Structure formats: structure tokens, C-alpha cells
Image (cartoon, grey):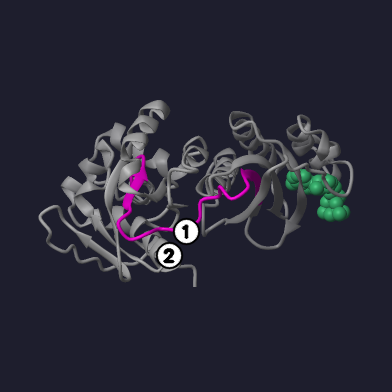
Amino acid sequence: MPQVDEFGLISRLFAPLAARHPGALGLTDDAALLDCPPGHRLVLTADALVAGVHFFPDDPADLIARKAVRVNVSDLAAMGARPAAVMLAACFPKGTPFSWMECFASGLKADLEEFAIPLIGGDTVATPGPATFSITALGYVENGQELRRSTARSGDSLWVSGTIGDAALGLLVAQGQGGDLSETDLAALLDRYRLPRPRLALGPALTGLASACMDVSDGLVGDLGHICKASGVGAILNADAVPLSKAAQAMIAARPDLLETALTGGDDYELLFTAPPSAAAELEVLSRTLGLRLSRIGTIIEGQGVLVRRSNGEPLPLHSGSYRHF
Ligand code: ADP
Ligand code: MG
């Protein structure tokens, strides 16, 4: 195994990912330079992934890197922003093999190329603690067009992209609790847990159309509660309208208690947004254009809190909230 110091790691693993952005200065200076297009604002977000908390220490290194990128750019999409660049603080446990770091960098490269985003800076350190990767994502949104959580209005419809619950059920699959699902269903759920699909095209397309938006990272019901609180409104969520994949439907059919897991579990990285009822036709068109399912799952009402109901109007009692770190 070659002995590579911090600067060797930066030039060999990370500088190639900065090549497309002149302001990154090849990762050879102290910091990067970034222009903001006229009429736009910078949108910034950071998320850390910690071994043992956000991923299993023996997960494939390239997937860890890709997940770190994806959860961050998902936050940009949730603001209606287009990604411009990312920065990475990589804390590798002392003694991490170079091959592991190479694999990590290859995953980073794959996703940054897929999303056409340059790496423009960061930090590389050894840590006595668990592997920790913090990514800062920077994007742009036209002045005044950002999608906030605080601007939902009573009477708005509640929408969500894609399908909900796959990642939370995928985590159960990773823990060996997949039951006797088919191999295809097991693989589909596991994949959604390991590799979120940030809705990068949808977010910017919702500017001017959605009244409020966030990405679902900690669980649909809990995250909806955040929109309600920030907007000073309540919501009725129709549990039977929440879109479930075939694999999730199969797993819930075998264990009906897992509907609650799907509604409250985390890691979906879909966009949850509100829009006036008049936007419905345009949202249908957008859904077809993007080839992405958009489902109406409820209504914003006056008051506070989230009421979860079945289609027949019966309340669905939920026992768990969303994931909390503290
Ligand atoms: P400092 O000594 O100020 O911490 P470094 O030597 O760590 O600076 O970093 C040198 C350059 O390399 C900087 O431009 C920094 O942004 C970049 N850099 C360091 N680590 C990474 C990384 N993991 N990803 C991207 N850029 C990095
Ligand atoms: Mg440094």
C-alpha cells in the first residue's frame, strides 16, 4: 500500500474532481473563488455523515461518498436551487487503507460527474474517531424564487414526489428483517436506502408553482410537521394516498404495522411541497415531463399539527415520531 500524505491525497484523489471549475484553483490554493450569476442568490447547506450513525462502517466506500453528495444536493433541490459546487471535509480514521479512500473518491467522482457539479475545496484529516464526511453544497436560485418551508397556506394541496418509505424499509432489509420478500423487492428497497435519488430537476421546476417545499429526510409525517410549524398551519395527510413502490406494498402487505414505518421512517429524499389547487394541472404536466410521479397526499388547513387519516376518514394512530439525534 503506498504511503500517501494529506497533500498527496488531495492531489491524487480530489484535485481531478475540481478540474472543471477554474475557481477551484486546482485545490492548490487556500480557498476557492465562486461567482454568483446576476439576479441570483447563493444557497448553502451542509450535512455530515458519521460511521455508525448514517452508514454502516463496512458499507462500500463509494456508496458512502455518493450518499453524502446526494443528501446535500437534495437540500438544494428542496430550496428550488440548482447546484453549483460542493466542498468536502473528509475525516478518515487513522490507518484507513489508501484503497478505501480511492474507492470513496471514485464514488464521489461518479456522482459529481452524473450531476455535473465540481468539487471546489474542503479539508482532509485523520481522526481517532469514526469516519466522518461533511459536505457543503452551494447552489443558486433566482432572487425571491427560493422555496421555503414557512410559506404554506391554508387551502393548499399537499404533494410528494416519487415513492415514500422505501429507504426506511430498506434499512430493515439491511438489518435482515426483509421477511420472505422476493429478491427483486429486497434489492429495490436496499438500493433506495443506500442510494437516495435527489430530485434535482424537480426542485427548480417548482419555483413559481409550489408555495412551500422541503425534502423528506427524517420521515414524511415528522417533516410535514416542520412545514406546518414553520408556516403556522395544520395538515391532513391521507395515508392511503401516500405513494408506495411495489416492493414497499409487498412488505407492508406481509406486515401491516410497517405502514407506520413507511410514513415516519427517514431517508426518502423525495420533495414534499404545497401548492394552490389551481397548480394541479401544471403539476401533472411537470410530472409527465420529468417522468417522475407526483402525488397529491393531503391538504393544508388552519390550525396546527398533522392529522393522519385513511381514505374513509378514520384517523391512523401513529406511535413513533421521526428520527431524532438527541
Ligand atoms: P489548510 O492547510 O488551510 O487546511 P489544506 O492544505 O487542507 O489547507 O487544503 C489545500 C487545498 O485543498 C484547499 O484549497 C482545500 O480547499 C483543498 N482540499 C483539502 N481537502 C479537500 C477535500 N477533501 N476535498 C476537496 N478539496 C480539499
Ligand atoms: Mg486542511
- Percent x, y of residue 28: 88, 41
State yes or no: residue 141 in magenta.
yes
Disc 1 secondary structure class: loop
Name the residue type under label 1: Arg
Residue 127 is drawn in which quadrant?
bottom right
**Mark 2 crowdedness (10 Å alpha carbons): few <14, some 14-19, many ≥20:** some
Q: Position of residue 19 (x, y in %)?
A: 78, 30
* Residue that extends furthest to the left in the rendered view of this protein: 312
Report the residue marked by disc 1.
149
The disc label shown at residue 70, or none: none
Residue 296 visible? The answer is: yes
The reply, left or right, for residue 198 in relation to residue 102 is left
Evaluate whether residue 1 shows in this view. Answer: no
Quadrant of the image where one finds ligand 2? bottom right
Where residue 20 appears, as percent x and y from the top left, is 76, 29
* Residue at x 64% of width, y 37% of height: 108
* Nearer-N-terminus badge (2/1): 1
Q: Which residues are magenta?
A: 135-164
